[in-house]
């Protein structure tokens, strides 16, 4: 596909990456003279439903913290989604490499609260919040951009998943998603809080050696964040813990979580892990302890299917 012109407008320049549902390319928009990303997805089975769902969701959204959809088309049996090209790295890569300070994680969390609040106000629930679906951009405001609405739920659209279907990424899934129940905005709050919990502590309390063991851990007792990171502001850690309640109606709202994060930013360290500060020692210690105790926690961000 590299070197071809698609939709009579976009010149495919290089392959960026691929996954279970398609391949993403960098392309050049000859009409508006700008770089774009083109996602090519075979239109069959769940993949076809997924691309429709992503396009429908993205078409409702207009927020700087959400990757913008420019165009959708079909060519040679593939559905093509043309989006803004976001330069940067995923939150998963940066967090696993220890390249984010506590304060930067907080700033990214606040950005994601705003982006998700916009999506929810438009009737869109993402349902797959995880570090791999967050792109972090240097020298940008906001720094974080939310990607991949391929399993999103549209509140006023015909259901694209049947009752009892489990959608999302297991290690970041809310209890209601894991049980195949309806996932509302509270599910995104849970997954976002779990993402931040993992970034700050180095531990995902769900992840186990096998998908079955991970599924059993979802909704179980989670160690309070301050037990792993006693140096974090109490109000911030308590807010994250509250959002991890197995009961959706006991979780904080995005506005409440965002406020707790923003109110704590000045108290968060701007040092990188392993470089300076008491919080760094605790965070690295938590990682080492997780490896020593369990041996089954995947600490490298690879999502279980």
Image (cartoon, rainbow, N blue to C red):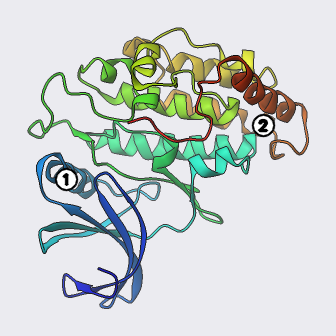
Identify the residue position indicated by label 1 in the image: 56
Q: Is residue 291 left or right of residue 272?
A: left
Q: Nearer the viewer, residue 12 or 155?
A: 12
Q: SS at mark 2?
A: loop
- Name, please, the residue furthest toward the top: 221
Q: Quadrant of the N terminus?
A: bottom left
- Residue 60, position as x, y percentages in the image: 25, 53
Q: Residue at x 76, y 23 (%)?
A: 229
Q: Residues within 10 Å of mark 1 (few under 14, many from 20)?
A: some
Q: In whole angstroms, how far apart are the C-alphas of marks 2 and 1?
A: 38 Å
Q: Residue at x 54, y 16 (%)?
A: 242
- Residue 292, position as x, y percentages in the image: 74, 22
- Position of 78 relative to 48 (above/below): below
Q: Residue 3: which quarter of the image?
A: bottom left
Please report contact status of discs 2 and 1: CB closer than 8 Å, yes or no: no
Q: Nearer the viewer, residue 161 or 288?
A: 288
Q: Residue at x 75, y 25 (%)?
A: 286
**Is residue 234 visible in this depiction of the protein?**
no
Q: Residues within 10 Å of mark 2 (few under 14, many from 20)?
A: some
Q: Is residue 9 left or right of residue 224?
A: left
- Residue 78, position as x, y percentages in the image: 17, 67
Q: Quadrant of the C terminus?
A: top left
Q: Is residue 63 left or right of residue 272?
A: left
Q: Which mark is residue 268?
A: 2
Q: Nearer the viewer, residue 177 or 261?
A: 177
- Position of 115 relative to 171 (above/below): below
Q: Residue at x 32, y 91 (%)?
A: 30
Q: SS at mark 1?
A: helix
- Residue 13, position as x, y percentages in the image: 40, 83
- Name, please, the residue furthest toward the left: 158
Q: Which mark is residue 304?
A: none
């Amino acid at each position: 596909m590299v070197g071809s012109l698609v939709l009579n407008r976009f010149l495919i320049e290089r392959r960026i990456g691929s996954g279970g549902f398609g391949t993403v390319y960098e392309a050049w928009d000859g009409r508006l003279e700008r770089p774009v990303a083109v996602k090519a997805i075979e239109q069959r089975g769940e993949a076809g439903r997924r691309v429709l769902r992503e396009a429908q969701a993205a078409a409702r959204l207009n927020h700087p913290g959400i990757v913008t959809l420019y165009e959708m088309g079909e060519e040679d049996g593939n559905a093509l989604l043309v989006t803004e090209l976001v330069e940067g790295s995923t939150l998963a890569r940066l967090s696993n490499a220890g390249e984010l300070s506590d304060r930067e994680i907080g700033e990214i969390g606040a950005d994601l609260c705003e982006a998700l609040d916009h999506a929810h106000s438009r009737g869109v629930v993402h349902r797959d919040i995880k570090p791999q679906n967050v792109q972090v951009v240097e020298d940008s405001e906001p720094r974080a951009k939310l990607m991949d609405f391929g399993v999103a739920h549209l509140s006023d659209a015909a259901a694209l998943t049947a009752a009892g279907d489990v959608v999302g990424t297991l290690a970041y899934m809310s209890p209601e998603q894991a049980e195949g129940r309806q996932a509302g905005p509270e599910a995104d709050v849970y997954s976002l809080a779990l993402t931040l919990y993992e970034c700050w502590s180095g531990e995902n309390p769900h992840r186990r050696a096998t998908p079955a063991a991970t599924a059993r851990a979802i909704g179980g007792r989670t160690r309070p964040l301050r037990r792993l990171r006693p140096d974090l502001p109490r109000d911030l850690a308590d807010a994250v813990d509250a959002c991890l309640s197995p009961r959706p109606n006991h979780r904080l709202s995005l506005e409440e979580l965002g406020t707790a994060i923003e109110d704590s930013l000045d108290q968060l360290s701007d040092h990188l892990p392993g470089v300076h500060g008491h919080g760094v020692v605790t965070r690295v210690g938590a990682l080492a302890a997780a490896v020593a105790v369990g041996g089954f926690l995947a600490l490298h961000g690879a999502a279980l299917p």
